[in-house]
Amino acid sequence: MSKYQKLSNYTGIKKDTKNGRYLAIKYLNGKQYSKKFDSLKQALFWRNSFHPALPAKLLEAKCEELGPRKKLFIPKLHVKPNGEDLGYRFRDVWELYKELHLPSLEKSSMEHRLSKLSFYNPLMDYLMVEINASLIDRFMFDHKEKAIKEKSKRYNFNDDLKCLKALLNWYRINYDAMFIVPILPRHKQAGLIKKTPMRNKKLKPEELIAFFSELSEFWRDFAETQFYMGARVSEVAGLQAECVDLKEMEIRVQYVCIWSNKTKKFDYLKETTKNGEISYASINKRIEEIMRRRLPLSQNGFVFHKDGEPLTYRQIQFQYNKALRKAGLADRFSSTHIMRHSMGTITRRVTGSVDMAQAVTRHKDIQVAQQYASLPTEANKKAVNDVFEYLNEIELKCGG
């Protein structure tokens, strides 16, 4: 694989994929000249200006002026006002947003939005009418340069832009209907530092059984519950004994464990799932067996706990990754979301139905929201039982 990535929009400029520097190449009279730079601006200037007859020091001095700044700074731009000039600066809107809107969000969502302060800082002194797409272009350019220079581990600024867009939209709705939210698709592209690595999250049936086999009884019960429920790990960690109905053979999916973003320890129990709805998962033979074993041991309402304390995310992550290593799968799989993905994939394999897979995982996207608005269904019940029989048969063969 080539060390350099061609930049389609800039002729004669390549980017070093390892250190983020730019290689400028110029041909004069059949001879190639090249030089490396820290910033794209330097590389472009050198390529447009270089000539062997020009004093090298003169070019170097100019390139140095165009180099990355020590501080993130955005120059004032003379632009057409965006919306009505009400005198608000970005910092004023941020304070209003914190005071009037953020308290209405879930605690975890509020903390997440507050964590974006450092991303917003360069915009603080700008009037709202000055914030347009061109300013955001420069804003993203500087953030990306800073991240590359500091060798940040981040892949992009997608989430930061999403939160900024939400803040600006709140301002538009509540204060200035003429304001145009200037976050565009090109800004997402401008914030791309490196591609997010693709990790396989779908275990094959034999791999799934190998993974389960390396877990202790408690953690296998936890993992199998997550698998057959097609649930998020936070939904199983937050599962309350009151939500398990062995008479109707269904589990009410309602409560969710919220962990601290910093420590990953239990923060609080949220009373609604990610999409804000209560749904149901059918209980098959294996889940019935697990629940009859776990319900008498439940404490403080939690079906799964450690000495009465809610599970931390690190505990779950450690046990899953340890089992993956022991099963020889750690080179291809990680994270706690593999159960949800695997259940959807195996359900489709067993039943041949995308509808069945969505019934099990309870996904709700725009296209299927109405179709799957009233789960559980007979499809959900049939799917979890069919998958259990399928995996049980494979496990018996492996054991034999």
Image (cartoon, rainbow, N blue to C red):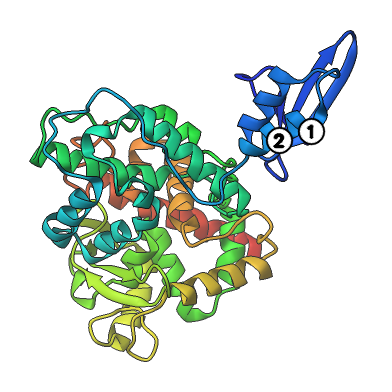
Residue 240 position (above or below residue 66): below
Residue nearer the viewer, 328 or 188: 188
Residue 61, labelled with which disc? 2
- At mark 2, the secondary structure is helix
Q: Is 312 displayed left or right of 298 in the figure?
A: right
Residue found 66% across the figure and 24% down from its top: 45
Name the residue at the bottom extreme.
Answer: 307
Contact? badges 1 and 2 (CB < 8 Å): yes
Which of the 4 image quadrants contains residue 181? top left
Going by the picture, which residue comes out furthest to the top? 29
Which residue is depicted at the point 24% across and 86% down?
300
Relative to the observer, which residue lies in front, 280 or 286?
A: 280
User: Residue 134: x, y in percent?
Assistant: 38, 28
The numbered disc on residue 57 is 1
Residue 173 is drawn in which quadrant? top left
Coordinates of residue 151 in the picture (x, y in percent): 63, 53
Q: Which mark is residue 259?
A: none
Crowding at dot 2, Cα within 10 Å, few <14 / some 14-19 / many 20+, comes out as few
Q: How many marks?
A: 2
SS for callout 1 = helix
Residue 371 x/y as whole percent? 21, 35
State the image coordinates of residue 313 (x, y, percent, origin top left).
43, 72
